[in-house]
Amino acid sequence: MTSSHSTAAVSYLQALFDYLRLRGVAAAEVLDGAQIDLADRDARVAEPLAAGCFNRAAARLGDEDIGIHVGEQIRPGHYGVVGYVGMACSTLGEAMLCLQRYQAMVVDVGARPIELRGQEVLLSWRPDDQSHYYRHMAEFNLAALVTFIRWITGQPLAPLRIEFPYPAPARLDEQQRVFGCPLVFDADCYRLVVPLAWNELPLIQPDPAMRQLMDRLAEKQLLTLQRQDDDLVGQARRLLAQKLSEGEASLDRIAAAMNVSPRSLQRRLQDQSSSFSQLLDEVRRELAGRYLEDPALDLTDLAFLLGYSEQSAFTRAFKRWHGKAPAEVRAQRRSAR
């Protein structure tokens, strides 16, 4: 249940670190030097990185079924607001629709619309990049979902079947124990198949008022996530342009203005083949071209507006951008006019 572009919420990945902590294993032992701010539960982690943590945890504990074991320990808090929306629903069918709608907030795994086939309900996930399958992470995703369904219904439910798009592991004892249903491998995608009758099953803690409140919060967070994905670089670029002349164009200040951690902002920029220093350089270069057209600004003022403490630092940067000093370019532009 993964793609090269998929991400997971830190709150969701925290299930693995909680599991490891109870077994005396520190998060740093499986992070392999990756910089993840575990305190920033809204931060996003590229799924290959998350899958790597599961793989290293499996090796560290000698547990080839680590995904299954972490998944069966899932708690609503690991799903964040999405978990509380699901808990507050009246029926399982309603909860499954909510989980499908808000899934990207937890882990973005290419969820497809829920299908009805006769007396079966099909929940499917197709990776964008089908050349990579992460078994431990995938088993965690599915075991967590089945465990959560059992938790909110208070019933030991078993799906009709579960399908995986990779070959069967050598042993399936733990998969069969936890899922309690037929398992199909080498399928076209990940698929959880449940009886249609599950839709009408009541939940143990329905709360319409809480559902409405959590729904609004989930919608707000979903829109925020979409805006961050669609316009992250543009948002950071605009803030840099605003903060440069105020001397507040540092990574920490820009991240705070975007309501994310500095590490999270760096990761998101990296996902879009950029970096904070690269973006800062691009914004300065663009603004320098505009400011140079204003005859009322001398070069010292211009350097200050771009956040440089000295004009000499601005001149060096300008020469790197254009191969000429700013005074020379300004003179050429005036002559041309």
Image (cartoon, rainbow, N blue to C red):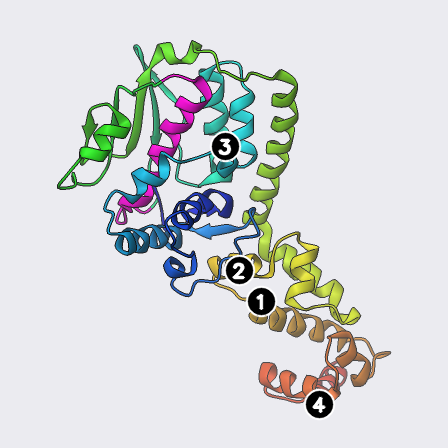
Q: Position of residue 247 (x, y in %)?
A: 76, 72
How many angstroms separate mark 3 from mark 2 (CA)?
A: 30 Å
Quarter placement of the C terminus: bottom right
Q: 79 or 291, which lies in front? A: 79
Q: Which residue is mark 3?
A: 76
Residue flagged by tag 2: what amino acid is it? Leu
Image check: 307 left or right of 14? right
Q: Which residues are magenta?
A: 129-155
Q: Secondary structure at mark 1?
A: helix
Q: Nearest to the eye among marks 4 and 2: give it.
A: 2
Q: Which residue is mark 4?
A: 312
Q: Secondary structure at mark 2?
A: helix
* Residue 112 in sight: no
Residue flagged by tag 1: what amino acid is it? Phe
Residue at image x 53%, y 60%?
Answer: 269
Q: Position of residue 5 (x, y in %)?
A: 41, 50
Image check: 83 left or right of 123? right
Q: Nearest to the eye among marks 3 and 4: give it.
A: 3
Q: Position of residue 313 (x, y in %)?
A: 68, 86
Residue 186 quadrant = top left
